[in-house]
């Protein structure tokens, strides 16, 4: 990527690529260069005006407040998802533990009956 100075010199033709001196020699060359630069600056301003829009400060503040609210809501949603995932994993673990405990209890009861009757 070229530097800022190089991009601006290419955009506004500060230096030509043929190796000419950056300062024009005659008055006519100066006038044509300045007219070209003015024309290019006017075109750049026109494109900038198309891209930019004036917004009242109160509306801009409301937009920024809403953006802040969205950011806060996103953080809260992420935390809620995290808690839900943790609760789901814990629930699955406890179900599995309960299942294993019931199986152990059943095997213990069977063994106990077996030993009791013999």
Image (cartoon, rainbow, N blue to C red):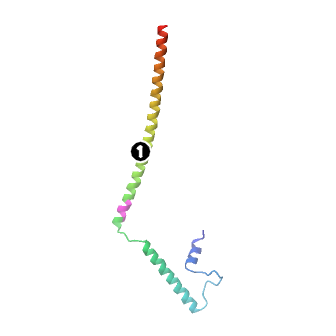
Residue 88 is a magenta residue: no
Q: Which residues are the magenta region?
A: 60-64
Q: Label 1: how many residues lie within 10 Å, few (<14), some (14-19) or many (20+)?
A: few
Residue 59 position by quadrant: bottom left
Q: Name the side, left or right, on which 31 lies relative to 46.
A: right
Q: Main secondary structure of the magenta part?
A: helix
Is 16 above or below relative to 52? below
At x 48%, y 21%, the residue is: 104
At x 63%, y 80%, the residue is: 17
In what quadrant of the picture does the N terminus appear? Answer: bottom right
Residue 9 point in image, percent of width and height:
58, 77
User: Outermost residue toward the bottom?
Assistant: 27
Q: Mark 1 points at which residue?
A: 80
Residue 32 point in image, percent of width and height:
55, 88
Is 101 above or below relative to 1? above
Q: Nearer the viewer, residue 118 or 36?
A: 118
At x 47%, y 30%, the residue is: 96
């Amino acid at each position: 990527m070229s530097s800022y100075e190089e991009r601006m010199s290419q955009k506004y033709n500060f230096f030509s690529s043929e190796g000419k001196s950056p300062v024009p020699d005659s008055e006519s060359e100066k006038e044509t260069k300045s007219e070209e630069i003015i024309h290019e600056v006017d075109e750049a301003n026109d494109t900038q005006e198309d891209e930019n829009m004036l917004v009242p400060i109160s509306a801009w503040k409301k937009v920024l407040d809403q953006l802040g609210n969205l950011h806060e809501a996103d953080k809260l949603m992420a935390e809620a998802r995290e808690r839900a995932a943790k609760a789901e994993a814990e629930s699955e673990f406890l179900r599995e533990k309960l299942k294993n405990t019931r199986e152990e209890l059943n095997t213990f009861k069977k063994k106990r009956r077996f030993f009791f009757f013999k």
